[in-house]
Amino acid sequence: MSAETLKSARNALVLIAGLLIAWQALYWLVGDAALRPPLATFRYTATLVTSEMFWPHLSESMRAFAAALAIAVGAGLSLGFWLGFHRFSGQVFEPMLVAIYSIPKITLYPILLLTFGLGMPAKIAFGAIHGIIPIALFTINAVRNVKPILIKTGRVHGFGPAEMVRSILFPAALPEIFTGFRIGFSLTLIGTMLGEMFAAQRGLGYLLMTAIGLHNVDLIMAVTLLLIAFAALVSSILLAIDRRLHRRV
């Protein structure tokens, strides 16, 4: 194990320990009305994940999130390559993307409900709209930063648009594109959970909203802990890959 890996592991352990200490101190300050201590939360979480009622909610959330992320990545990359490679189109439409991205997404939720109805399609759509534009904007910037000599080489070889993207643009722009994917992942997860909280009958977001309505602090803490643990684990892995890709540039 390298010294850098050991240092990263040590820093992670220190951060986790610090968060647990802060959590316990906050519990002592606030009390049972709004929080549970770390140990009690871990025990309840272990009970929750072994119960039969939990897994249908988890499965629903993961299916919605996976579909939303796939749509966000596919649409974001397609839009980003188009606007990044065609300068005029990018100059026209990029400001529109930025303006749309500045709109609070929750204001669009009634439109999505009218369009898709309650259930899985609305959750997927709400998750996807959170991730598409960040991925597209990072991809636009990444394509624009590709060295012109590489693009000229592709044109000399007679590459069409698809071959240009596959053989020239994507490999050269991959580090920045992956950064956009990492951010899009987090935002798509947030969007999917919000979609479940406001108009769903299953899923972790629905479970969390139900717990809030019933003031079930144990369930609130357990679901929140699971979501944070999942997001932190995957984000850490994506960040490590992101750093490795940027080192190769």
Image: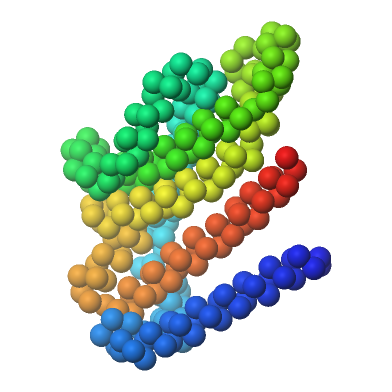
Total number of numbered labels? 0
- Quarter of the image where one finds residue 72: top left
Q: Residue at x 55, y 20 (%)?
A: 85
Asked whether, in this view, residue 35 is left or right of residue 181, the answer is left
Q: Residue at x 68, y 45 (%)?
A: 246
Q: Is residue 155 visible?
A: yes
Scheme of image coloration: rainbow
- Quarter of the image where one finds residue 222: bottom left
Q: Nearer the viewer, residue 65 or 57?
A: 65
Q: Quadrant of the N terminus?
A: bottom right
Locate residue 60, reporting x and y percent: 38, 54
Locate residue 204, reporting x and y percent: 36, 61
Q: Nearer the viewer, residue 149 or 174?
A: 149
Q: Residue at x 58, y 33 (%)?
A: 142
Q: Nearer the viewer, residue 147 or 48?
A: 147
Locate residue 160, reporting x and y percent: 62, 12
Q: Is residue 60 visible?
A: no
Q: Residue at x 36, y 75 (%)?
A: 221
Asked whether, in this view, residue 157 is left or right of residue 36, the answer is right
Q: Quadrant of the C terminus?
A: top right
Locate residue 143, reporting x and y percent: 58, 28
Asked whether, in this view, residue 239 is left or right of residue 153, the answer is left
Residue situated furthest bottom in the rendering: 28
- Quarter of the image where one finds residue 170: top right
